Image (cartoon, rainbow, N blue to C red):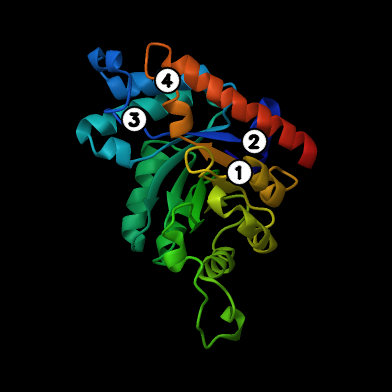
Amino acid sequence: MTKQELFAIIKKKKSFLCIGLDTDITKIPAHLLNEEDPVFEFNKQIIDATHDVAASYKPNMAFYETLGAKGWISLEKTINYINKTYPDIFTIADAKRGDIGNTSSMYAKAFLETLNFDSITVAPYMGEDSITPFLEYKNKWVILLVLTSNKGAFDFQTSGLVSHLEKDRGLRLFEKVLHASKKWGTPDNMMYVVGATKAEMLIDIRKIAPDNFLLVPGVGMQGGSLQDVAKYGMNKQCGLLVNSSRAIIYAGADDNFAEKARGEAVKLQKEMEELLNIYL
């Protein structure tokens, strides 16, 4: 999916909502456990109920890998269902991969070719050669971890650099990642993860990366402000995919769980529509 196609989806749906499919089999409604594939059935009903207000879905790999081979089958069925039934949805493999070049090449092939996701989250710690294999796929995206929403982000990501290089002096680690990665990819194939709980730092991020899309987790259960994210992070092509996972998919626990999930998704979509009207 191209950047222009993604922006067209956002304008059409009046939404930059990404729904995280962090599907925990211990939390899904009990009646689904009688299904042949409870995880896929849960995902399918969530997707069917929310596809018209969601620009993106983001399965988190950990929730599928923990189930072994069955989880991988559920994941494959989920991405195939989205691609076939709702091809205008931007899909994100929340895998946080990144390794030496030949290993990254296999990760890239697994998620961007075999499973045919539109994008994958990647950790930048090992540097350029661990990222470039993911950038070799046309109309696919790398979503680089830059400033995450968890408390531990302050352990390293916001630390100032001590460097003999004048260009690095005064930079924080997340700013160094932004500057370096701009040489690897472009706003047409690279996004960045920036947590909603660090919304005020979007000002500094936009100074370095004004045109890139940002994947923003942390709205909902983690307490991030959608209004602040839009105020500090939106650009002329929206430039945002704001993720909500638990607050949507676990909004209900009974037979009407999908309807409850839709209700929460629509609430966010309506807020996003208002923000798009203000800032675009």
Q: Is residue 280 visible?
A: no
Q: For this rendering, which residue is in front, 170 or 102?
A: 170
User: Disc 4 and disc 2: Cα gap in Å?
Assistant: 32 Å
Residue neighbourhood size for the residue with mark 2, other residues' Cα within 10 Å, grouped as few (<14), some (14–19), many (≥20)? few
User: Disc 2 and disc 3: Cα gap in Å?
Assistant: 24 Å
Where does the image place residue 242, in percent across and percent down from the top left? 57, 40
Q: Which of the two labelled residues, at mark 1 and mark 4, occupies the earlier sequence position?
A: 1
User: Residue 252: which numbered mark, if any?
Assistant: 4
Residue neighbourhood size for the residue with mark 4, other residues' Cα within 10 Å, grouped as few (<14), some (14–19), many (≥20)? some
Q: Which of the two labelled residues, at mark 1 and mark 2, occupies the earlier sequence position?
A: 2
Q: Which of the two labelled residues, at mark 3 and mark 4, occupies the earlier sequence position?
A: 3
Question: Which residue position is annotated with label 1?
Answer: 225
User: For the residue marked with disc 1, what is the amino acid?
Assistant: Ser
Q: Is residue 29 visible?
A: yes
Q: Secondary structure at mark 1?
A: loop
Q: Which of the two labelled residues, at mark 3 and mark 1, occupies the earlier sequence position?
A: 3
Q: Which of the two labelled residues, at mark 2 and mark 3, occupies the earlier sequence position?
A: 2
Quadrant of residue 58 in the image? top left
Where does the image place residue 238, in percent across and percent down from the top left? 69, 42
Answer with left or right where residue 152 lies relative to residue 214. left
